[in-house]
Image: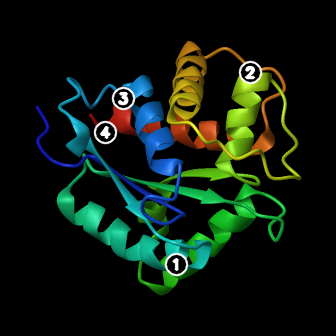
Amino acid sequence: MASRTQIVCLHEGKKGRSIDPLFIRSLLKSLNPPWIRPWPGNNVVRTVDCGGRSDLIAKMPRELQQCLAMGADTTLMVWADADDDRDDCEQLKSAFWKTAKEAGITSEQFEGVVFAIAKDRIENWIQFLRTGTTDESMEGPRIKHGRELADAARLLGAKCLSGAPIKDIPKSLEWSCENWRKFKHTHKSRD
């Protein structure tokens, strides 16, 4: 049984003011990654509030180096928003790669990071999960209740686990789900 952090999740926002930690924990618990069984408690996932996006980009290489030092069972996830200054998720991922490369991270190490990048905010994903539609060119409505957030995360987890195509899925959510699937298959092959 794991007794230490196995998934480190960096995200935008300030402690106590971001919805991301609740969504991240609820989603990961509902996905129930096969290499984390039984789920030994809240210490499995460590969320790290990173403030703004530039702070998040700057912190990522150091956190990745720490994860690598912990061993093969520790995964780094990066949760970010591709705002209107980025056309798509790949553009933002490239900014992370540039900073990581400058810090001495190899491309192989960088490919082990799981990116979840919402366009424009994670609230757009929640809006889609609750209503079946969202416009990623505009910010989704703010979520005020943790229950809505956790329910949306569990719904997303169930959809991901089913493996069935998700009708009208927002492009950033589809891109992020594909990153998770790639990681999941890579992790299985390491076992």
Mark 4 against mark 3, which lies toward the viewer?
3
Q: Secondary structure at mark 4?
A: helix
Mark before the other along the chain sequence, 4 or 3:
3
Marks 1 and 3: CB-CB under 8 Å? no
Q: Which residue is mark 4?
A: 190
Classify the position of the C terminus by image quarter: top left
- How far apart in space, not on screen, are marks 4 and 3 (Cα)? 14 Å
Q: Which amino acid does the dot numbered 4 rest on?
A: Arg
Q: Which residue is mark 3?
A: 33
Classify the position of the N terminus by image quarter: top left
Q: Nearer the viewer, residue 142 or 44?
A: 142
Residue at the image position 79 percent from the left and 58 percent from the top:
88
Q: Which amino acid does the dot numbered 3 rest on?
A: Pro
Q: Secondary structure at mark 1?
A: helix
Mark before the other along the chain sequence, 3 or 2:
3
Q: Position of residue 37 (x, y in %)?
A: 23, 25
Marks 1 and 2: CB-CB under 8 Å? no
Residue at the image position 51 percent from the left and 49 percent from the top:
20
Mark 4 against mark 2, which lies toward the viewer?
2
- Residue 63 is drawn in which quadrant? bottom left
Around disc 1, counting alpha carbons within 10 Å, would you say few (fewer than 14), some (14 to 19), or many (20 or more)?
some
- How far apart in space, not on screen, are marks 3 and 2 (Cα)? 20 Å
Is 162 displayed left or right of 49 in the figure? right
Mark before the other along the chain sequence, 1 or 2:
1
